[in-house]
Image (spheres, rainbow, N blue to C red):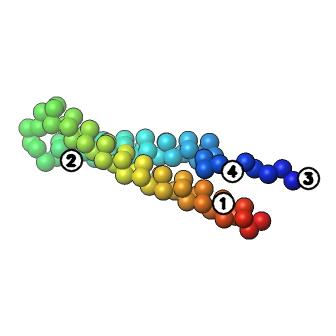
Amino acid sequence: MATERPLSALPSPLARIMAFVSILVGGLAGALIGYALVDIQAENAGDVARGIGLLVGAIVTAGGTAIVAILVLRAIGEWRTINDRTS
């Protein structure tokens, strides 16, 4: 008697954790890049300008990383579905 896995669109918990961590790392990298970019380009940049560069960099890169992570998680789900049909 084969035990069937219930149908679910949710990826594994490990895949979701890895996606979340990658979004955090992407946001951190973008924050560092945004801060450095403002610091290098503006000689007398104040803390507000650096903070805006940091915030914008973090939001943009975390958003882009989130889009890629969602696409990867969906692809994993579709691949599992196809794999289950062929077995």
Residue located beneath label 1 in the image: 81
CB contact under 8 Å: marks 2 and 4: no
Q: Earlier in the sequence, mark 2 or mark 3?
A: 3
Q: Amino acid at mark 1?
A: Thr
Foreground disc of the pair 1, 2: 1
The residue at the far bottom in this view is: 86
Residue located beneath label 2 in the image: 37
Marks 2 and 3, Cα distance to the nearest angstrom? 61 Å
What kind of element bears circle 2? helix
Q: Amino acid at mark 4?
A: Leu
In this rendering, the count of numbered labels is: 4
Q: Earlier in the sequence, mark 2 or mark 4?
A: 4
Asked if residue 74 lies left or right of residue 80, the reply is: left
The image's mark for residue 7 is 4
What kind of element bears circle 1? helix
Q: Residues within 10 Å of mark 1 (few under 14, many from 20)?
A: some
Marks 4 and 1, Cα distance to the nearest angstrom? 9 Å
- Asked whether residue 8 is in view, the answer is yes
Q: Position of residue 72 (x, y in %)?
A: 52, 56
CB contact under 8 Å: marks 1 and 2: no
The residue at the far front in this view is: 7
